[in-house]
């Protein structure tokens, strides 16, 4: 798939092996993995970071194969999921950081364009999440509210 804001082709990546069940060498059971996910989520980690830690530190190649659910589903079940989706909150953090940079570097036009592109992605995701009922219909993105929500 092509990139959203550049005239280039997508990135070539490796693919996972086609397996349908968790390998026998995985050291933990499904309930232990769910407890680890809840503990890490309460510590403030996002689901992508939790997946990396489970893979690198605990030797769990795929949470979905082991538990039958993805990390965000487990977080929602246990009541520790964040109120904003992870992708939109990370884009909002990037927009806040770029806005801080733009205040001290007013002539940086390439980063001004980058900020516009990030904000357009946020608005696109906002529309998608409103249509799917993840965000309330009166939720509106602005840099001021993003700073208040994420700090």
Image (cartoon, helix red, strand yellow):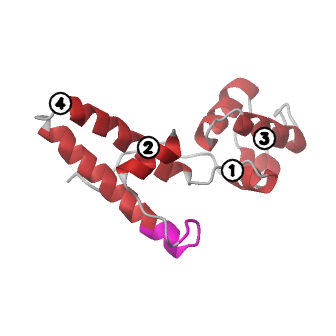
Element assignment for label 2: helix
The mark found on residue 81 in the picture is 1
Cα separation between marks 4 and 1: 36 Å
Dividing the picture into quarters, in which one does residue 7 lie?
bottom left
Q: Residues within 10 Å of mark 4 (few under 14, many from 20)?
A: few
Lower position in the chain sequence, tag 4 or tag 3: 3
Q: Which residue is mark 3?
A: 38
Cα separation between marks 1 and 3: 9 Å
- Which x, y percent locates residue 25? 82, 32
For the point 70% across and 43% down, the residue is 62
For the point 24% across and 45% down, the residue is 114
Lower position in the chain sequence, tag 1 or tag 2: 1
**Foreground: disc 1 or disc 2:** 2
For the point 80% across and 35% down, the residue is 36
Query: Of 34 and 126, which appears nearest the observer?
Result: 126
Residue stretch rendered in magenta on the structure: 127-136
Cα separation between marks 3 and 2: 26 Å
Q: Residues within 10 Å of mark 1 (few under 14, many from 20)?
A: many
Q: Which residue is mark 4?
A: 105
Lower position in the chain sequence, tag 1 or tag 3: 3
Element assignment for label 4: loop
In this view of the protein, can residue 2 be seen by the observer?
Answer: no
């Amino acid at each position: 798939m092509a990139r959203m804001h550049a005239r280039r082709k997508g990135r070539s990546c490796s693919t996972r092996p086609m397996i349908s069940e968790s390998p026998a060498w995985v050291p933990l059971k499904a309930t232990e993995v769910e407890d680890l996910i809840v503990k890490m989520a309460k510590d403030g980690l996002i689901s992508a970071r939790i997946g990396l830690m489970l893979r690198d530190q605990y030797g769990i190649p795929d949470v979905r194969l082991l538990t039958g659910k993805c990390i965000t589903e487990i977080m929602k079940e246990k009541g520790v999921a964040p109120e904003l989706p992870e992708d939109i909150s990370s884009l909002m953090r990037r927009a806040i950081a770029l806005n801080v940079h733009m205040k001290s570097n007013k002539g940086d036009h390439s980063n001004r364009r980058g900020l516009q592109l990030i904000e357009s992605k946020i608005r696109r995701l906002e529309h998608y999440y409103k249509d799917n009922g993840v965000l309330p219909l009166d939720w509106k993105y602005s840099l001021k509210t993003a700073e208040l929500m994420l700090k």
